[in-house]
Amino acid sequence: MNAALAAFGREVGRKLGRGGQSEDQLRGPLERLLGRLSRHVGLPDTVAYGEVSLKDLHARPDYAVDGGNACVGYIELKHPARGVSLTRDWRPSSKERRQWHKLQARPNLVYSDGLLWRRYKYGEPASEPVRLTGGFTSSSGPLCATDGQFMGLISDFLMWPPEAPRSLAELIKSRAGLCARLHDEVYAVLAGAPGHAAHEHLTLLAENWRDLLFPGLDNENFA
């Protein structure tokens, strides 16, 4: 784990300070770090893919992460030392605060600025904030985790299992999140290329609804 973190830190350090946006310099190194850590916990099929549009939320987290063929969660990156949501040193801009309110609908979300990491479940912290030691410069020493908290956070994120709700409020929150995902998928199929396996069936169903129930129904409202 620490070998993977040290390599991540070195790679980010080589990219910072050359004129690019700091946050963007985390992206490639993060994908490689996540690949190494997922193999470490026995999940070699994990894939992180960027800039996923969540149309119902009008939000675009930096990464969605699939385990096999199912999405397990999302990762939002901030530039180094920016901090993450709901920590004492978090000073969000108005744009960051709006984004955070939108992403709270997700049951498995990680915020990270490369040095500080935290996992969230429906807008509530699902882990303590984990701060790595070292940094991205040669003078700060190699990036590493001093205990098992970081690997625990990554393992919980990658192996996130659906949980039975313990109250009516949890039930409502969890179903709302799943309904939002279903909306995203239905709208994407209708608005996308006709080659999707469900495109023909959903298009026919939408046409039937327009003919029988809702004249003028567009794809967004059908979804």
Image (cartoon, rainbow, N blue to C red):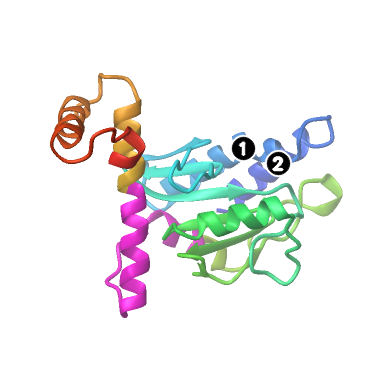
Q: Is 170 displayed left or right of 126 in the figure?
A: left
Q: Can residue 161 be seen in this view?
A: no
The local crowd at label 1, few if under 14, some if 14 to 19, many if 20 or more residues have their Cα within 10 Å, is: some
Dot 2 corresponds to which residue?
A: 23
Label 2 element class: helix
The percent position of residue 77, horizontal first and vertical second, equals 63, 47
Quadrant in the picture for residue 94: bottom right
| 156 vs 208: above or below | below
Write down the residue under mark 1.
Answer: 27
Please state which amino acid type lies under the numbered disc 1. Answer: Arg
Find residue 66 and report its image quarter.
top left
Instruction: Give percent across and percent down for residue 81.
Output: 77, 55
Quarter in which the C terminus is drawn: top left
Contact, mark 2 vs mark 1 (Cβ under 8 Å): yes
The magenta-colored residue range is 152-181
Would you say residue 165 sits in the magenta stretch?
Answer: yes
Q: What residue type is labelled 2?
A: Glu
